[in-house]
Image (cartoon, rainbow, N blue to C red):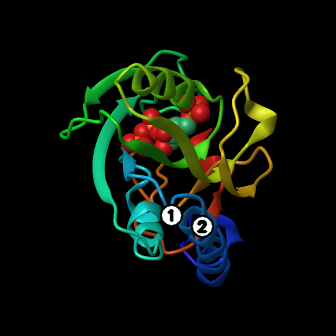
C-alpha cells in the first residue's frame, strides 16, 4: 500500500465485482438504445476504461471535461466546461460516466447542459457516491458504492493531480491535505 494511504476502501477485486454488476445492468437497459458513454475527464478515465469493456453492446465513447476543484478538497460550486463533446449527441442515449459524486455540482450542471443538447436521454453512472457531502439534490441512475465522508484517491481519483494511478481506492492520510 502507498505510504500516503490510511487504509483501502475498495480493493481491485471489489472494484472489479462492482463494475461487473454495473455493466450487466447497463447492458440489459440499453439493449435497444443508441448508447454513447460520456467520460467525464479526468477522474473517470480508469473507471470508464474498465466499465466500457464489460458492456456487451454496440456503443460509442465521447469525452467532456469540467473542472471545479483546484488543489483543495472543497468544491467551489461553480463549473467550467473546459472540453466539450466531439460528436453530435442528437438522438443519442448519453450515459455520463463519473468517478465520484461529492457535492453533486459537477453532475447537476453537466446533466442539465447535456439535456439541452438534443440527446434522446441523459443518465449517469458513478462508481462512488458520498451522500453526506451533497449540497444539491441529485443521484446517479447507476451507483457502484456509497461511501463515507472521507477523502479518497486512486483508481482515477486524485489529490492535487496525484494518486490517480493507484489500482485501488484508498483513504488519504489527513496530514497530506490538512
Ligand atoms: C471531481 C470528480 C467529479 C467531481 C465530483 O472532479 O471527478 O467530477 O469532482 O465533485 P462534486 O460532486 O462536488 O462536483 P474534479 O473537478 O476534481 O476534476 P478531475 O476529474 O479532473 O479530478
In the rendered image, residue 88, in percent from the top left (x then y), is placed at 22, 35
Secondary structure under badge 1? loop
Q: Distance between the residues labelled 2 and 1?
A: 6 Å
Secondary structure under badge 2? helix
Q: Can residue 78 be seen in this view?
A: yes
Q: Residue furthest left?
A: 86
Give me the residue at 26% from left, 28% from top. Answer: 82
In the rendered image, residue 157, in percent from the top left (x then y), is placed at 49, 54
In the figure, residue 28 lies in which quadrant? bottom right
Q: Is 37 on the left-hand or right-hand side of 111?
A: left
Q: Which residue lies furthest to the front in this view?
A: 32
Front residue of 142 and 90: 90
Front residue of 50 and 22: 22
- Quadrant of image for the N terminus: bottom right
Front residue of 66 and 150: 66
Number of numbered markers: 2
In the figure, residue 13 lies in which quadrant? bottom right
Give me the residue at 68% from left, 78% from top. Answer: 14
In the figure, residue 15 lies in which quadrant? bottom right
In the rendered image, residue 17, in percent from the top left (x then y), is placed at 66, 79
Q: Can residue 73 be seen in this view?
A: no
Q: Which numbered tag is attached to residue 8?
A: none
What residue is pinned by disc 1?
A: 31
Q: Looking at the picture, does residue 26 appear above or below residue 67? A: below
Within 10 Å of the Cα at label 1, are there few (<14), some (14-19), or many (20+) other Cα atoms?
few
What residue is pinned by disc 2?
A: 28
In the rendered image, residue 10, in percent from the top left (x then y), is placed at 68, 71
Front residue of 7 and 47: 47
- Quadrant of image for the C terminus: top right
Give me the residue at 57% from left, 62% from top. Answer: 26
Amino acid at each position: 500500500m502507498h505510504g500516503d494511504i490510511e487504509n483501502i476502501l475498495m480493493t481491485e477485486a471489489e472494484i472489479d465485482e462492482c463494475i461487473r454488476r454495473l455493466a450487466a445492468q447497463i447492458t440489459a437497459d440499453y439493449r435497444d438504445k443508441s448508447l454513447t458513454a460520456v467520460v467525464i475527464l479526468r477522474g473517470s478515465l480508469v473507471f470508464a476504461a474498465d466499465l466500457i469493456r464489460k458492456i456487451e453492446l454496440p456503443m460509442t465513447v465521447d469525452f467532456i471535461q469540467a473542472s471545479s476543484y483546484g488543489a483543495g478538497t472543497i468544491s467551489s460550486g461553480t463549473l467550467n466546461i473546459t472540453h466539450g463533446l466531439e460528436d453530435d449527441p442528437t438522438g443519442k442515449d448519453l450515459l455520463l460516466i463519473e468517478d465520484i459524486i461529492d457535492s453533486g455540482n459537477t453532475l447537476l450542471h453537466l446533466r442539465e447542459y447535456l439535456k439541452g443538447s438534443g440527446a434522446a436521454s441523459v443518465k449517469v453512472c458513478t462508481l462512488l457516491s458520498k451522500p453526506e457531502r451533497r449540497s444539491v439534490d441529485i443521484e446517479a441512475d447507476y451507483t457502484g458504492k456509497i461511501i463515507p465522508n472521507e477523502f479518497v484517491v486512486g483508481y482515477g481519483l486524485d489529490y492535487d493531480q496525484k494518486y490517480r494511478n493507484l489500482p485501488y481506492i484508498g483513504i488519504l492520510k489527513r496530514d497530506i491535505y490538512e
